Amino acid sequence: MASEIAIKVSDVSKTFKLPHEKNSSIKGAVINFYKRNKSYETQEALKNISFEVKKGDFFGIVGRNGSGKSTLLKLLAGIYTPSKGNIAVHGKLTPFIELGVGFNQELSGRENVFLNGALLGFSRKEMGEMYDDIVEFSEIERFMDQKLKNYSSGMQVRLAFSIAIRARTDILLLDEVLAVGDAAFQQKCFDYFEELKRRKTTVVFVTHDMGAVRRFCNKAIYIDNGNLTHIGTPAEIADVYLEENLESARQASEKQSDEPGLSDRHRITGKITEQSEGKIIYEVSYDSKESEELYIGIAVSKDGISVAEIITSLEKPLTGKGKISYTLDTDVLNAGLYQLSAALFGMRNKNLLTYTKKKSDFTIKGSDPTKGSAIKLADNWTY
Amino acid sequence: MHRFLTKQNRALLTELVRTDFKLRYQGSVLGYAWSLLRPLMLFGILYVIFALVIKSGDGIPHFPVYLLLGVVLWTFFTDMTTQSLGSIVGRGDLIRKIRIPRWLIVFSSSISALINLGLNMIVVAVAMIINHVDLMSSIVLLPVILLEIYLFALGASLFLSAAFVKFRDIGYIWEVLLQLGFYLTPILYAMTIIPEKFQKLQLLNPVAQAIQDARYVLVTHDPKVITSYRVFDGGWYSLIPIIAVGIVLIGGLLYFRKESKYFAENI
């Protein structure tokens, strides 16, 4: 049924003309006209995109940097006009491409709330009804009558975000707004997303945070280089994203080759030699020119944070050069993208001699009911 | 009309105009009083020079009011067009990040200029009382004349603001053209000092025609107030300025509508 659809995108393409040298002058235009010199190149930011967002969807748009997802969001918002195809929107749509658009430093917090609200399409009366809610959410009641220029940047962001998510609308477009605020504030935002989901507000959401995609979205698309390559469940799309990132990381690290470690006298490299269901074998090669006792530690990290570490037994020091393998039991890990790295220590675990420049990536596929944690806990409940 | 002035658009327009006024006299001691003080003081200077020293009035009755009205209307035209010219580029941050009707930005600049015109007309009214100018029944035509200048300025504003996105030269060119227009338009002097064939040329300019008509209907019917109707003997030539306003308005609207789709990517 048509009324079920919030946004329908049919065969949309967007082409930008990128002048080699921007000629914002009549002289430039005249010269170009006579030269018949098309001194611009066209860039196809999006190619024949079609999809539908149903009412009540929490819809994720995922893609790597420069893939065209922000262009898509701006097209949905009506900021850009499609070069081809069309976009039909049913309901009141409020875009948040950036927070605090139109904020004026010379106006008070209160005035800015109303100005920002008007820019988002709300009347003064509607804003009046939402005002207390917004102020309460932003936690800056005391400062509302002060000029915005006297606010800290954190306070400004909080105020802007509060307006953004308190705004009652049918369809919300959010562009990576999660990347603001401290941890406590982010938690508030997540809580609010849960509320949006419960209220069945349609949300279109551009992000790099696969945890958030898995947690909130019920549908997602993957954009690669202007093409819509995948439509699917958040878990599928998150896997695609991780795979693609892994691929490009692999290519980048191949170029990097084996750089010397901290010191040329110590070398350590590691690679995954085998990956199968439930286990990974990580092989570490080390080479030290000094005749001291060596120990090797390896770390498993996720999102740049070490989640598990182990070091070779202090009773069995290594020497010289050699290879050593560790078999990692991956059944303890939740789904996601992980990295393995190794480090070489000397003299009773006191000093770090060198570590692997190139980390080894691996992906654990499947679903992660905790949306982002690393270690899988057993189902040891006592009812 | 209500397709354009929806509830949301009205709300936004009010906020934009409100902000504009709030910020204009930000940090000044006298604040809003400057809206009236500024034109009064500027007029004081012109009055001393052109009514007392140079006496460019050529015996026109109530010349100070005649002079003031011309200055006020010309100021309205220049203020509105220069403010609108940079309005789209100046609000680039909004246009690139939010979906608002682009014409609303130019429209809000024009409303700000209209409010200023209203304040300045109060000054004109005060000057009329001081000068004992009798109200004539022809005053009912004044709103029509003001509307004409407004529509002409609006057409020019739409064109200029859209063209300025692509060609930043427009800013300088317009400044020079306005300076030229200031002397070609009979603002500071009585038109009787101009040879008749030049009078005809002069009155093809809608702003000149409107200023002269406004003086005729508001200040004095003295034969020295040369209007386009008088200079062309009521012939159809006197309609040329009106037609010019129509062309500028429609041309400006069409150009703006065509270009506005690409403002977000061109700014």
Image (tube, coloured by chain):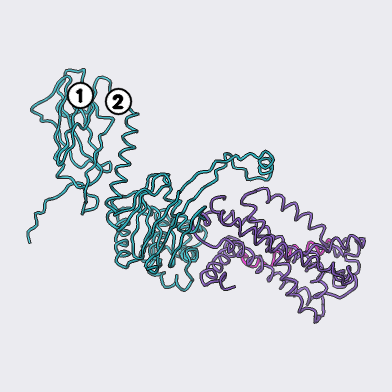
Chain colours: A cyan, B purple
| Quadrant in the rendering for residue A30 | top right
Picture coordinates of residue B89, whole percent (x, y) = 59, 53
Q: Chain of mark 2?
A: A
In the image, residue B35 lies in the stretch drawn in magenta: yes
Q: Is residue B233 above or below residue A30?
A: below
Q: Chain of mark 1?
A: A
Give the mark, 2 or 1, whose residue is nearer the N terminus. Answer: 2
| Quadrant in the rendering for residue B102 | bottom right
Determine whether the residue tagged by mark 2 lies in a helix, strand or loop. loop
In the image, residue B187 lies in the stretch drawn in magenta: no
Kindly indicate whether the residues beneath marks 2 and 1 are on one polypeptide chain: yes
Residue numbers of the magenta segment: B30-49
Q: Say which residue appears at 60% left-offset and 55% top-offset.
A: B259
Viewport quadrant of the N terminus of chain A: bottom left
Name the residue beneath numbered marker 1.
A286
Report the front residue among B215 and B267.
B267
Residue A258 has which mark? 2
Picture coordinates of residue A243, whole percent (x, y) = 29, 42
B29 sits left or right of A354 in the view: right
Report the front residue among B21 and B27.
B21
Q: Is residue B52 above or below residue A229?
A: below
Q: Residue furthest right?
A: B195
Q: CA distance from mark 2 to mark 1?
A: 13 Å
Picture coordinates of residue A177, whole percent (x, y) = 38, 54
Q: What secondary structure characterizes most of the magenta part?
A: helix
Determine whether the residue tagged by mark 1 lies in a helix, strand or loop. strand
Picture coordinates of residue A292, whole percent (x, y) = 16, 20
Specify the amino acid type for callout 2. Answer: Asp
Specify the amino acid type for callout 1. Answer: Tyr
Q: Residue furthest bottom?
A: B137
